[in-house]
Amino acid sequence: MAVYNLRPDFDWDSEGIKEVRKRDGRIVAFDATKITKAIAKAAEQDGLSRPQEIALLMTSEVIRVIGTDFPQFTTPHVENIQDVVIKVLKENDLGSLADTYLTYRENRTKSRAEASNLLKQIGAIIKESPIGIEGNANVGHNFSAKLLQIASAASKWYYENELLPTDIAKAHKEGYIHIHDLDSYGKTLNCMQIPLDKLLKNGFSTGYGFIRPPKRIGSAAALMCIIMQSSQNDMYGGQSIPWMDKSLAKFVDQRYDDLLGSDLTDEETQLKASITREVYQAMEATIHNLNTMHSRAGSQVPFSSVNLGTDLTPRGRLITEQFLKAFYAGLGRGETPIFPNVVFRLKTGVNFNPEDPNYDLYQLALKVAGRRMNPTFSFMDSSMNKPFGDKTSYMGCRSRLIDNIYGESTSEARGSIAPVSINLPKLALESEGSTETFFEKLDQTLALCKKQLLHRVEVLKQRTVSDIPFVMGEHLYMGSDDLSPNQSIWEAMKHGSINIGFIGLAEALILLTGKHHGESDISQELGLAIVSHIRAYCDDITDKEKLNCTCYATPAEGLSGRFIALDKKEFGTIPQITDKDYYTNSFHIPVNYQISAFNKIALEGPYHKYCNAGHISYVEVESPLENNPKALESLHRKMAASDMGYAGVNFPIDECVDCAYSGIVDNECPVCGSTRINRVRRVTGYLSYLHRFTTGKKAEYQNRQPHKKA
């Protein structure tokens, strides 16, 4: 091969090009290493041995050819140089490498175009364009939020164009898959179920001195909020407390245990009231803190969730009772708290039946949920949760984690590493009605998801404890206790999970069968086959790759609009498929389909057990259920009977910004006439204001139809 007869001793300083003309007309100093880097990358992709040596030799030959054959190129254009590179490669029997280099060149051209688009995005963010909030209704428009959005846009561009394997980047750009939180691809992990007991017992540091263990409930509750805020700053997903009742109970005055019953003296009655008031104030402060304490450089409040309801001790019950009462009371003027997401565990023998010791707390939770939409409810007796007692914890967005091939199966001290989601309607559109073709395409896409997740894991293995200083350095994550600051996070990270999600099952079924799963038993059977197939593939990854891999009913907040926009551009407007601005979430029955609540629950329930990374189902009602808790309880019993793991009931809550009136408001407040109305609604699991919803979710909300009970 002629390459080995070239001149490796070529003197670039004395014989080389001095300047080069850029595409924008600028003349800059010539940098030969850019040619070398491009050829080396192409050689590596071609699987050639000694790619760097080949690249150096080829670079010297390119410079020689330009100087010898094209003396008129005193200041060559970069395009001229690239043409010479291809010529030289072909003349030296490296035709395949020339083709690969050409592809690299074309991709770089696209990358430059996208970089130009990036600048436009940044300009739009600065000008307060909605483009900055299309992914998360919990991110505002303040100074810090804009800085975060600009950094996010730049990071996405970098990872998509410089780090991702070509086929993965292409699949993401074209909307076959969606890599969630691409801006954080190589920086950190997703979310966390915080081991609160451990931190409150041992104390911790946020980087500016040591915080000693608390002694009273007020201090413990305040530190819990600080811990969630600090953990949020290390991660891009949510933060959850697995057992808030059990973890905080030990900080309640111990004398409370002896103050139960009806035969108390006046002094004992006053002491009990004092302790109860202290706990209420601590819980009230918790709710206020989690709606005002900002994280991630001030761009948003922590995406917080708390799980409670199963502690049977007197002090644990008091925590749950007073927290629910404080949540019911709301914020300073009675406004509905957006955070924390509250997850009330339901379990037979504990709180689900009238004879259970915590049934009274369940009744209180029903009253609060009927007024505030929170708590949502998790079912510990469902088939996927029952083997773990009451250990399974959820986040408000629906995330769930329990199984662990590397250690104890528990939610605590673990979280999601990263998810990726599949565009099921796109696969169905390309399958043209063939179920066989659809499953072939699904397998191909699952293979891409696997490759992408394994790649992300390898990238994240390079992170050290000092890169994630609070979560890893303060030993929140399982397996991090013995890691030093400069060690890889892998020994802790391996306890987390990678997740493959999906959206648009309903639209995919319409394309494949003519009806969605709310309309047809055949479609329901196919829908379950599709989701169980994804779950089986995840289980296979767990077995073969020795990673906790789980199936995810993707929340798809911004994604529901992104996927459909791409498909509408490619396939046009198709009735019931792309004739709207969103795809239906995960396995849900379309929101505009008229169906009873009980039928919806019965049809969606069987999907929960397959989605072991997280799942949620909703029932929509026309107005709050505060005065009809039995109706909500009957829905829960149907959910439990249908093997649901996690669910909520939605209804409108409208609140006047000016006078704090709360009710259902049309255009203006009936009390003060103000048109400044915060419309509290649920989006992908958590509460937010309707005006903060993404474009797709606003369109979905407008199409939601209430469900009658029967």
Image (spheres, rainbow, N blue to C red):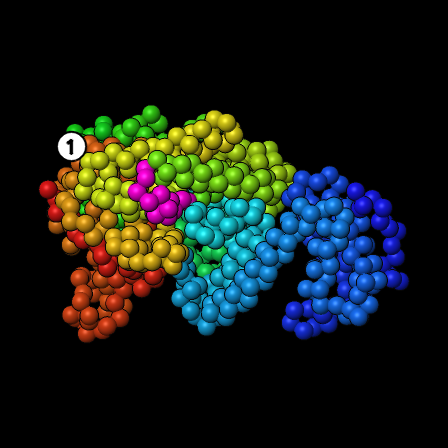
> Viewer-proximal residue, 107 or 143?
107
Residue 112, how many percent across, how many down? 59, 62
Residue 443, how many percent across, how many down? 42, 36
Q: Tell whether 498 sits left or right of 521.
A: right
> Viewer-proximal residue, 435 or 505?
435
Residue 160, how many percent across, how many down? 54, 53
Q: Which residues are magenta?
A: 421-435
Q: Is residue 194 visible?
A: no
Relative to 22, residue 402 above or below? above
For the C terminus, the quadrant is top left
Please tell me which residue is depicted at 77% across the width and 46% down the height of the picture. Answer: 54
> Viewer-proximal residue, 360 or 489?
489
Task: Report crowding for label 1: few under 14, some 14 to 19, many 20 or more residues within 10 A (C-alpha).
Answer: some
Q: Tell whether 293 sits left or right of 281.
A: right
Rendered image quadrant of residue 17: bottom right
Single out the residue that lies furthest toward the left.
Answer: 710
Q: Amino acid at mark 1?
A: Pro
Residue 410, how many percent across, how many down? 41, 31
For the N terminus, the quadrant is top right
| Residue highlighted by disc 1 | 354
Magenta stretch contains residue 432: yes
Relative to 20, residue 236 above or below? above
Please tell me which residue is depicted at 54% across the width and 42% down the height of the picture. Answer: 456
Please tell me which residue is depicted at 76% across the width and 61% down the height of the picture. Answer: 31
Rendered image quadrant of residue 605: top left
Please, what is the dominant secondary structure of the magenta stretch?
helix
Q: Is residue 128 visible?
A: yes
